[in-house]
Image (tube, rainbow, N blue to C red):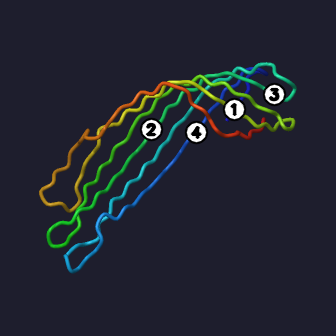
Amino acid sequence: FRKFSSPTSAFRLGVFIGHSSTTTVTQDENSTLSQVELMDKESNTTISIQPGIEKHFAGTERLSPYIGGVVNIGYGMDNKREEQQEPNNSVGAKITKGGSLDLGLNAVAGFDYYVANKLYLGTEIGFGVAMSKDMTNKVSWDNVTGAQDGESNVDNKSTLNVGPNVNGQLRLGWVF
């Protein structure tokens, strides 16, 4: 979304909502060996918003170059279920629920080319800093003898990235 407050200044807002899910069979059922089918299931949901500002410069009648800044605020939710075979051929599972917090700041430069009065194609490049921090995981057990629920930071990480970012796409937009 982009809203011009003047002919040369615009507020922009990007929103991203994504979900992925994976199921992997880790053991086939085999009655001869008294094995049951086991699966690992993982899912991830990400929500982020990217508010920003743009300063547009005089180009040509159809070309509108700009520079700007964008803030990224994101939250990710991770769920993982790892099944294991228990005595008497029952299935137990370790369930891990966690997430991450993402923050970033980018300087961007781009252009819009107006193919019609209020219809444009555009692209941009940028340079910025991004930080991601995993949160403490909640670990629970389903039908596993002697296992205790708790919290874990195993495999958690935090990252800091500084560098260029390029949107390798053309953006199609229109002005309201």
Between the residue at mark 2 and the residue at mark 3, the CA separation in whole angstroms equals 36 Å
Of tags 2 and 3, the one toward the viewer is 3
Q: Label 2 sits on what residue type?
A: Tyr
Residue at horizontal 81 percent and vertical 19 percent from the top = 58
Above or below 25: residue 19? above
Above or below 141: residue 62? above
Q: Is residue 112 left or right of residue 154?
A: right
Above or below 129: residue 97? below
Q: Is residue 127 left or right of residue 147?
A: right
Element class at badge 1: strand
Q: Label 3: which residue? A: 63
Where residue 22 sits: x, y (%)? 42, 57
Between the residue at mark 4 and the residue at mark 1, the CA separation in whole angstroms equals 12 Å
Res. 41 image quadrant:
bottom left
Between the residue at mark 4 and the residue at mark 2, the CA separation in whole angstroms equals 12 Å
Q: Nearer the viewer, residue 25 or 69?
A: 25
Residue at horizontal 79 percent and vertical 22 percent from the top = 7
Q: Label 2: which residue? A: 75
Q: Is residue 58 left or right of residue 168?
A: right
Q: State which tag comes first along the sequence, 2 or 3.
A: 3
Are the residues flagged by discs 1 and 2 in contact, CB closer than 8 Å?
no
* Circle 2 residues within 10 Å: few <14, some 14–19, many ≥20: some
Q: State which tag comes first along the sequence, 3 or 4.
A: 4
- Circle number at residue 171: none
Q: Label 4: which residue? A: 15
Q: Label 4 sits on what residue type?
A: Val
Q: Label 1: which residue? A: 2
Q: State which tag comes first along the sequence, 4 or 1.
A: 1
